[in-house]
């Protein structure tokens, strides 16, 4: 069954209890099945308010985030990798409390413009963390999907083919997340990436080419 949702940032940029309630109510009023919550700071996210709101309106929830420089698991710095893993684990725990089935986004590197290419060691650090986080997520029935993003927002996964190679060999709980905005920048067309990841595709963002 296909679940069609809406990102909470469509409705508000503030995710305190009032912002959460507003976003959830607007998502239901617009006729969607699911709301995607931004979990940039999962420790500060009001889980109780979110659970009450989605239960009241009969919505499912997913969560997405992008890592920061200090939590970049594609780094060669053990402290950053450890901090990133802790953040991702907290995000999984939040989603488990919400009864969610999906964590997605730029969960494999910092969401920023890099001035240097990713290193083999950094990529392996990232894959190892994603594998461990996916194991914890699986216990709660949550799938982790890595979002393919443009070169200005990551230097690790910019094409569907790269995501397919990154995910290969990891747990079945790890999938691919495509986004038409990023595909418009990096891919030659909109069909090939879908076919290239068909057996791994778990989540899709659909938006205007200019993010409108």
Image (tube, rainbow, N blue to C red):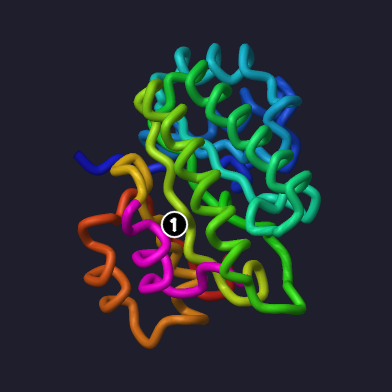
Categorize mark 1 by other alpha carbons within 10 Å: few (<14), some (14-19), many (20+): some
Could you tell me which residue is drawn at 56 percent across and 53 percent down? 126
In percent of width and height, residue 85 lies at 63, 38
Could you tell me which residue is drawn at 80 percent across and 49 percent down? 70
- The image shows residue 23, relative to residue 192, as above or below, that is above
Query: Which element carries disc 1, helix, strand or loop?
Result: strand
Viewer can see residue 12 = no
Tell me the quarter of the image containing the N terminus.
Answer: top left
32 or 133: which is nearer to us? 133
Viewer can see residue 145 = yes
Q: Is residue 175 left or right of residue 6?
A: left
67 or 57: which is nearer to us? 67
Count of residue discs: 1
In percent of width and height, residue 79 lies at 78, 44
Tell me the quarter of the image containing the C terminus.
Answer: bottom right
- The image shows residue 88, relative to residue 113, as above or below, that is above
Q: Residue furthest bottom?
A: 188
Magenta span includes 156: yes
Q: Which residue is mark 1?
A: 205
Could you tell me which residue is drawn at 50 percent across and 45 percent down? 130
Q: Quadrant of residue 200?
A: bottom left
Q: Is residue 69 left or right of residue 211?
A: right
In percent of width and height, residue 205 lies at 44, 57
Q: Is residue 1 left or right of residue 84?
A: left
What is the span of residues highlighted in magenta in the rendered image? 155-169
In percent of width and height, residue 48 lies at 62, 12
Q: Quadrant of residue 15?
A: top right
Could you tell me which residue is drawn at 50 percent across and 36 percent down? 133
């Amino acid at each position: 069954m296909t679940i069609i949702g809406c990102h909470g940032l469509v409705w508000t940029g503030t995710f305190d209890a009032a912002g959460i309630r507003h976003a959830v109510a607007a998502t239901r009023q617009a006729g969607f099945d699911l709301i995607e919550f931004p979990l940039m700071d999962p420790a500060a996210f009001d889980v109780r308010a979110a659970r009450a709101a989605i239960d009241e309106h009969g919505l499912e929830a997913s969560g997405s985030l992008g890592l920061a420089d200090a939590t970049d698991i594609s780094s060669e710095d053990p402290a950053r990798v450890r901090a990133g893993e802790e953040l991702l684990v907290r995000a999984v725990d939040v989603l488990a409390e919400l009864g969610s089935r999906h964590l997605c986004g730029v969960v494999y590197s910092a969401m920023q413009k890099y001035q240097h290419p990713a290193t083999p060691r950094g990529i392996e650090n990232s894959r190892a963390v994603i594998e461990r986080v996916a194991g914890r997520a699986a216990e709660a029935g949550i799938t982790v999907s890595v979002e393919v993003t443009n070169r200005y927002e990551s230097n690790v996964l910019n094409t569907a083919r790269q995501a397919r190679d990154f995910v290969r060999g990891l747990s079945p709980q790890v999938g691919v997340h495509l986004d038409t905005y990023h595909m418009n920048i990096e891919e030659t067309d909109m069909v090939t990436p879908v076919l290239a990841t068909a057996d791994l595709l778990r989540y899709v963002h659909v938006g205007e080419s200019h993010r409108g």
